[in-house]
Image (cartoon, rainbow, N blue to C red):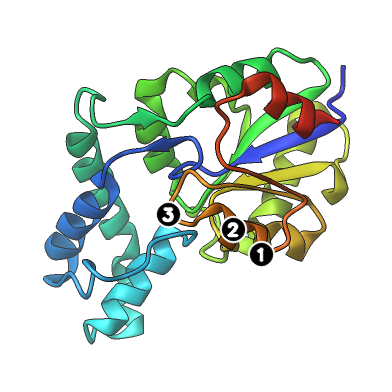
Amino acid sequence: MLPSRVFLFDVDGTLITARGAGRSALGRALEETFGARGPIETYDFRGKTDPRIIRDLMLAAGVAAARIRALMPACLAAYAVALAEAVGDGSRVETLPGVAELVRALGARGDLLLGLLTGNVETGARLKLGPTGLWPYFRVGAYGSDDPDRTRLPAIAAARVERLTGAPVSMAQLTIIGDTPLDVECARACGAVAVAVATGQHGFDELRACGPDLVFRDFGDVPAAVARLVC
């Protein structure tokens, strides 16, 4: 059966929290690659792609744009190593309320397809989700490693859905689920359904003010969440 809807989830703050593992790992990678961390302790990571974060931090540290571009692959490789160590046995990764049950409920339906749309590079997303057991449910993904501009990721995800299923998918068939105003903006920019959930660092009222199609405090009530998402 071809999917009628595609649900694309953000990772950090939406599916899981890794309790700062990403920030600490990136700081280590920046030191190893550039010899500087930039204003990493105050920089707002929320909703941004990993390459954009690296570029912003290193520009703030006075690193030339050409050097940032040249060393980006090395920095991301160092980040993957540091993140694997930070995640360790997985005890640092916490699945957010109702998420595991929601993903399994949606993934069990033949008329739906689950994927990821995240600022994480693919390796980072895999490392963070690996301990949860949920990675296999996400059959496609668009990542920060595909493009540093988050608004370009829905088209990449749609192309991968088409390659997987053999059928084109319209932007109206995509539902983008995230915990930041930038996730809502990303959905709005491409004509996808925008769903916000206040399990990250933005409150319910702040997210609702961004005008998503649906907004949740969390996914703790799984039957209600499924009913609202697939109506």
Q: Nearer the viewer, residue 225 or 51?
A: 225
Are there few (<14), some (14-19), or many (20+) residues within 10 Å of tag 3?
few
Relative horizontal placement of residue 89, taking residue 51 as reference (left or right)? left
- Quadrant for residue 184, please give it: bottom right
Are there few (<14), some (14-19), or many (20+) residues within 10 Å of tag 1?
few
Distance from label 3 to label 1 (Cα)? 15 Å
- Could you say whether the residue bearing mark 2 is in a helix, strand or loop? helix
Residue positioned 57% across, 42% down in the render:
217
Residue 195: where, in percent of width, then height? 69, 47
Are there few (<14), some (14-19), or many (20+) residues within 10 Å of tag 2?
few
Q: Nearer the viewer, residue 170 or 200?
A: 200
Asked whether the beta carbons under mark 1 and mark 2 sit within 8 Å of each other, the answer is: yes
Q: Check residue 118 in the rendering and tell me which mark sits there, or answer none.
A: none
Q: Name the amino acid, label 2.
A: Asp
Residue 39 makes an appearance in the image: yes
Residue positioned 26% across, 71% down in the render:
42
User: Disc 3 designates what residue?
Assistant: 201
User: Disc 1 designates what residue?
Assistant: 209
Quadrant that contains the N terminus: top right
Nearer the observer, disc 2 or disc 3?
A: 2
Number of callouts: 3
Q: Answer with mark 3 or mark 1, whichever residue precedes in sequence.
A: 3
Residue 2: where, in percent of width, then height? 87, 23
- Could you say whether the residue bearing mark 3 is in a helix, strand or loop? loop
Q: Nearer the viewer, residue 122 or 21?
A: 21
Q: Check residue 205 in the rendering and tell me which mark sits there, or answer none.
A: 2
Residue 69 makes an appearance in the image: no
Residue positioned 45% across, 48% down in the render:
200
Q: Name the amino acid, label 1.
A: Ala
